[in-house]
Amino acid sequence: MLHRREFLQLAGAAAGSAASASFAQTSARQRVRPPNLLFIQCDEWRAQSTGYNGDTNCITPVLDRFAAESVNFQTAISGCPVCCPERASLLTGQYPLTHGVFVNDVELVPKGPTLGETFRDAGYSTGFIGKWHVYGSPDGKYGRRLAFIPPEKHFGFDYWKACECTHEYNHSLYYEGSDPTPRYWPGYDAIAQTDDACQFIGRRAAEPFMLVLSLGPPHFPLTTAPENYQAIYRNRDIELRPNVPKELRKVATDDLRGYYAHMAALDDCFERLLRTLAGNGLVDDTIVVFTSDHGDMMRSQGLTTKLYPWDESIRVPLLVRYPRKFGNKGRHIMTPVNSPDLMPTLLGLCGIAIPASVEGTDFSGVMLGSKAAPRDGSAFINLPVPITEARRYGFAEYRGLRTERYTYVRSIKGPWLLYDNQADPYQMHNLLGKSEHRDLQSRLDKELDAALKRRKDDFLPAAEYAKRAGVSHYQELNVPIGKHPSPWGDWDSTLSPG
């Protein structure tokens, strides 16, 4: 693979040679040029809320067309469904107890080369626009969420227009490069950030680039999408998932109207990005990834936000389009893929060596057809330290597995959940302890033990991890523990406050 300086030298040599030599050199350059990477990550967009997955509420025609042209990881999992841990896993290719970010607002101190550094060192022009959320707030009270992030904490991203964390989508702060002056995106930030991303792409059409566009929506607040998108859903009937309790259906409907309004706005943003690639002749040789950091329960199982091992929380969209290698016909990969797998897979697709510090699995061979998908694969799911809503609802720390078909979870108190997601896609029937599923439970329990051993995870009490990390004072860890009555009656029987 050519490094950036070698690529530019080759381009210069071609320009200065005779016509026939120039043609030959240009053809060679086109053959060997690394692909571009445009990585689009939304916040809290669950896999179930996509039109291409059958959600009739979701009006996202651009995303649906894109899915028809992409590799669709149907069982893409956010293994630790919390904002900061997932983002740290993306940047390091590591699991939370390795990279050290297992609750929100812990500063990432990388133990090895990061995603941006690895692409930069391979000769790519690197850029990051939007929500960063790994600088952390050591005070435990969100003190650095709007703070200037020094360049040494950009982890290899040369072009930089980012904020640690804000959900003020219509008054959205950011910093540019090494300038500590606060700036604000005009209007709805996702639109302005998309415009900036399109300009980045246009200016770098002649060189390999890697751009991460990290968007805040559809994360709450759910009433702040532009008015024209809110109007689409204001009086629209919403089809709710069957696992939303009857008494919560009205509030779920109201919330989902705002959720889908944000999605409709992002779909238009996505269209502008794809048109920019096409206008610059970059479609075939640009890997475009669309995904999310985690999902949102949206009152399914009677719960709010993320954090939990149910599919609404852990399953995320993951679409990858690369026409030069994959063609334009979409296909599905059912094998579970986890957050730490993203970095090695992207490096593999670009022909870049994967750092030894990476723990995730490279799925590029599976996507390219040179390797078979792993049989009986599983994604490791975990919440080492319950925070915020998990504490309010009385949930204990947990570890588990999500296979293509099953979900098995063990809390610190013992076996907790077992679902057959094929027979029970809304996870309304816990099979744990049922005699006819004893062998299945035993097998998955052994597989979880093996996964814990691979992860060097001793499954200690949450307080021990918090103490070791020096985050016991964080306010998200000190939310009073409540006891929430389960709407289904069987899934919280092993959990109690304390």
Image (cartoon, helix red, strand yellow):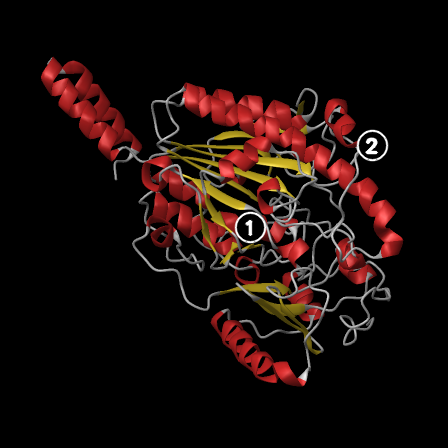
Q: Residues within 10 Å of mark 1 (few under 14, many from 20)?
A: many
Identify which residue, 236 or 277, lies in the foreground: 236
Task: Give the answer, above or below, for where 104 lies relative to 417.
Answer: above
Identify which residue, 44 or 86, lies in the foreground: 44
Q: Residue furthest right?
A: 247
Residue 178 appears left or right of 474: left
Residue at 77 percent of width and 30 percent of height: 224
Return the x and y of residue 320 as percentages of the image width and height: 45, 42
Q: Quadrant of residue 207?
A: top left
Residue at 28 percent of width and 32 percent of height: 33
User: Residue type at mark 2?
Assistant: Asn
Q: Residues within 10 Å of mark 2 (few under 14, many from 20)?
A: few
Q: How far apart are labels 2 and 1 at the CA level?
A: 39 Å
Q: Quadrant of residue 491?
A: bottom right
Q: Quadrant of the C terminus?
A: bottom right
Instruction: Tell which tag, 2 or 1, sits nearer the viewer.
Output: 2
- Asked if the residue at tag 1 contacts the one at tag 2, i.e. Cβ–Cβ closer than 8 Å, the answer is no
Residue 229 appears left or right of 160: right
| Residue tagged 1 | 88
Disc 1 is placed on an element classified as helix
| Residue tagged 2 | 235
Residue at 29 percent of width and 54 percent of height: 370
Q: Quadrant of residue 35?
A: top left
Identify which residue, 476 or 444, lies in the foreground: 444
Task: Give the answer, above or below, for where 139 lies relative to 214.
Answer: below
Disc 2 is placed on an element classified as loop
Task: Give the answer, above or below, for where 374 lies relative to 38.
Answer: below
Return the x and y of residue 166 as percentages of the image width and height: 70, 36
Dot label at residue 50: none
Residue at 68 percent of width and 82 percent of height: 434
User: Residue type at mark 1?
Assistant: Ala
Name which of mark 2 and mark 1 comes first in the sequence: 1
